[in-house]
Image: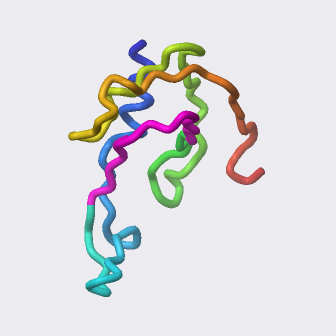
Amino acid sequence: DQEEEDCLDQFCEDESLDGDDSYYCSQCKVHQSAIKRMKIFRFPKVLVLHLKRFNKGRGLGKGKLSTDVKFPCFGLNLSGYCAEGSPEKGKGIFDLYAMINHSGSLSG
């Protein structure tokens, strides 16, 4: 389903870390720009997904998203999100076991 893929693609898209969010290298002792990337190398028996449900903006741009998120109850295929060289290619199929939905706003 396209909606599922859009949500996962947005969750997994590369994120630039710079300015106040820059990466701190413990070896160099310096903050530096970096790219944060989410890929799966080895699938666990139980996978817990915590989806970021907030705008990425700062200041007035921040807020909770109210868009519905739809996923299948059976056969969620995450093998397309496997890291390059992973021995798990084609093994990332999951069935929904439980779900938690936070209701409310950023302030409560």
Name the foreground residue: 23 vs 43.
43
Q: Residue furthest bottom?
A: 29
Scheme by which the image is coloured: rainbow
Name the foreground residue: 31 vs 99.
99
Q: Quadrant of residue 96?
A: top right
Q: Residue at x 33, y 23 (%)?
A: 90
Residue 46: image location, x then y, percent: 58, 35
Q: Residue at x 30, y 29 (%)?
A: 89
Name the foreground residue: 12 vs 80.
80
Please indicate whether residue 92 sits to the left or right of residue 70 in the image.
left
Image mark count: 0
Q: Residue at x 35, y 27 (%)?
A: 79
Residue 93: image location, x then y, percent: 45, 22
**Quarter containing the N terminus:** top left
Residue 77 in magenta stretch: no
Residue 37 in magenta stretch: yes
Residue 78: image location, x then y, percent: 40, 27
Q: Quadrant of residue 82?
A: top left
Please indicate whether residue 11 sits to the left or right of residue 104 in the image.
left
Please indicate whether residue 31 sits to the left or right of residue 62 in the image.
left
Q: Residue furthest right?
A: 108
Please indicate whether residue 51 sits to the left or right of residue 21 in the image.
right
Q: Residue furthest front?
A: 87
Main SS of the magenta part reads: loop
Q: Residue at x 45, y 53 (%)?
A: 57
Residue 50: image location, x then y, percent: 57, 42
Q: Quadrant of residue 30?
A: bottom left
Query: Image height check: is 61 above or below 18?
Result: above
Name the foreground residue: 50 vs 75.
75
Magenta segment: 35-50
